[in-house]
Image (cartoon, rainbow, N blue to C red):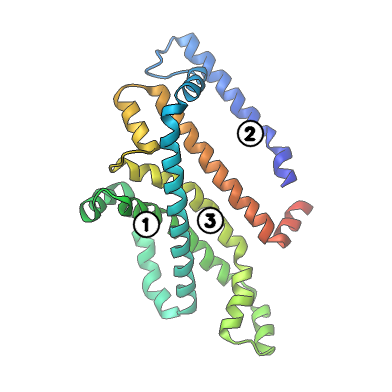
């Protein structure tokens, strides 16, 4: 973790330079704020409009976390079932891949028709976005377990259940956390998309109202906080990985 903090100044410096170039370009080109506001105006609006934006942000965070937990749980359970029952994996896995070719933004209106404007269709959208990366990552982790370790445990008298819980599942944790990090960032995007379907509050609602009134600075405020939430969720998953997968953390620190 210390290495990540020491290297963090590089992307921060690049981001700062981009903001400076953006500010100067907008000022020199005399671009109106409703078309492309400078970063200074975006930060001013983030501070001045926090009283209005805060409740929307809180609603999106709650929806993202709930959808992420549900999607992660379903993804992991699906991966376990597909791994332990080969004929189910052969029958279902190709269909899971095909399901990812369906654009969520197209499926979303159907969910509203079927389930209304409540919480359920929003959770379904986030779950559909989150579960697939975890399922694929966990399956890859299960398959990457060294065969020699499996043979050793079988020679020691381990049954199939013990083989899975004591070897395959722990060995798949690095791959599983990779899927969790992807899904954590996707969950915020899924929450915003689901709020476009119809909601009373949320960052998606805030963005819709801002864009319809040509308040481009507010749209950028929403985008800024979407990125911040995604980075924070990614960092939390990374921290949990460093704690639970200590052997991998030691290898990363030695590099």
- Mark on residue 162? none
User: What is the secondary structure assignment of the residue under circle 2?
Assistant: helix
Number of marks in picture: 3
Question: Of discs 1 and 3, which sits in the foreground?
Answer: 3
Crowding at label 2, few (<14), some or many (≥20) Cα neighbours within 10 Å? few
**Could you tell me if residue 255 is visible in this image?**
no
Label at residue 11: 2
The correct choice, above or below, for 237 with respect to 142 in the image is: above
Residue 254 x, y percent position in the rendering: 79, 53
Q: Which residue is mark 1?
A: 100
**Residue drawn 48% across the image and 18% down it:** 41
| Earlier residue among tags 2 and 1 | 2
Q: Tell me whether the residue at label 1 lies in contact with that at label 3, contact meaning CB atoms closer than 8 angstroms.
A: no
Q: Are marks 3 and 2 in contact (CB under 8 Å)?
A: no
Q: Position of residue 173 (x, y in %)?
A: 61, 64
Q: Look at mark 3 in the image and give the residue it sits on.
A: 180
Side (left or right) of 39 relative to 254: left
Counting residues from the start of the chain, the first of labels 3 and 2 encountered is 2
């Amino acid at each position: 973790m210390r290495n990540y903090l020491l290297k963090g100044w590089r992307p921060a410096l690049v981001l700062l330079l981009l903001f400076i170039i953006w500010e100067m370009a907008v000022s020199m080109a005399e671009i109106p704020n409703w078309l492309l506001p400078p970063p200074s105006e975006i930060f001013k609006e983030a501070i001045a409009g926090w009283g209005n934006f805060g409740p929307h942000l809180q609603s999106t965070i709650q929806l993202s976390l709930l959808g992420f937990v549900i999607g992660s749980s379903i993804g992991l359970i699906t991966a376990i079932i597909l791994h332990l029952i080969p004929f189910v994996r052969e029958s279902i896995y190709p269909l899971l891949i095909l399901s990812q070719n369906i654009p969520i933004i197209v499926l979303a209106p159907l969910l509203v028709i079927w389930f209304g404007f409540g919480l359920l269709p929003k959770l379904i959208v986030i779950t559909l976005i989150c579960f697939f990366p975890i399922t694929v990552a966990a399956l890859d982790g299960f398959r990457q377990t060294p065969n020699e370790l499996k043979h050793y445990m079988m020679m020691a008298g381990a049954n199939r259940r013990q083989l899975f819980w004591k070897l395959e599942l722990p060995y798949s944790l690095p791959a599983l956390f990779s899927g969790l990090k992807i899904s954590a960032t996707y969950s915020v995007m899924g929450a915003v998309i689901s709020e476009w379907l119809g909601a009373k509050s949320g960052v998606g609602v805030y963005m819709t109202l801002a864009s319809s009134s040509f308040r481009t600075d507010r749209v950028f405020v929403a985008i800024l906080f979407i990125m911040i939430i995604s980075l924070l969720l990614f960092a939390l998953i990374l921290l949990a990985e460093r704690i639970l997968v200590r052997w991998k953390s030691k290898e990363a620190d030695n590099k």
